[in-house]
Amino acid sequence: MERKTPDLAGLRKSYETGDLDESGACPDPHTQFAAWFADVAAANLPEPNAMVLTTASIGGVPSARTVLLKGHGPDGFRFFTNYTSRKGRELAANPQVCLLFPWHALHRQVIVTGRAARIPDEENAAYFRSRPYGSQLGAWASRQSSVIASREVLEARYAELAQRWAEGEVPVPDFWGGYLVSPETVEFWQGRANRLHDRLRYLRTEDGWQLDRLSP
């Protein structure tokens, strides 16, 4: 059956689920993020901690992918990955990143810009040991972003590792670990009717956080 191409120009939705005002905003972005994340969790959205991580090469060529937020607080936002992956290589050359939390069901977005830095080995180890056994093996099995001949090669590598570490603790790979993104700006976006969205941006200054409203 031939599939009908949707009319992209006609795809639109009016956002009328909430508002975002300076008077109700928290004094710092971390508290505001925690409040919004609590709303997302209460709404039972799928993968509420999924975020789009955008990196760029030293030459400015961007790339983006979805990763999972694994911690947040006053010091920033944490995620884990393979250091030899494309994003790992780009972060080593250019630590400036952007994070996007696309909470479409609530007509909300959060956009973070900042600098990523590796977290300490002991924190990597603590998180790695909290992962399911299969995920631990998966971190070893995949040379992320590298060319692979077939799916069978990957599965054979996984099976080999499952035999090697059938008993006992799976060691933390030296090519795997976490990053902390220290934000310079955090923008909270709330969809509104007639595309007159609310956009509040926190900007880091020497004296703390400056809150500005941006035109939609």
Image (spheres, grey):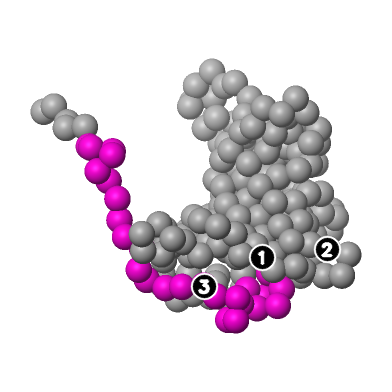
| Residue 172 visible, this angle | no
**Residue type at mark 1?**
Asp
Image quadrant where one finds the N terminus: top left
- Magenta span main SS: loop
Q: Is residue 7 visible?
A: yes
Element on which disc 2 rests: strand
Q: Residue 196 has which mark?
A: none
Mark 3 or 1, closer to the camera: 1
Element type at marker 3?
Answer: loop
**Quarter of the image where one finds residue 92:** top right
Q: Amino acid at mark 3?
A: Leu
Quadrant assignment, res 168:
bottom right
The residue lying furthest to the left in this view is: 1
Q: Give the residue number, with chain letter if any, for mark 1.
A: 212
Q: Secondary structure at mark 1?
A: strand
The residue under label 3 is: 20
x and y, in percent, of residue 71 in the image:
67, 64
Image point (76%, 56%), residue name? 184
Let me know if residue 53 is in the magenta part. Answer: no
Circle 1 residues within 10 Å: few <14, some 14–19, many ≥20: few
CA distance separating discs 3 and 1: 12 Å
Magenta stretch in the rendered image: 6-32
Q: Which of the pair 18/148 is nearer the observer?
A: 18
Q: For this view, does 101 lie left or right of residue 1?
A: right
Q: Nearer the viewer, residue 179 or 30?
A: 30
Query: Mark 3 or 2 closer to N-term?
Result: 3
Query: Which dot marks residue 205?
Result: 2
In the depicted structure, whether residue 65 falls above or below residue 45: above
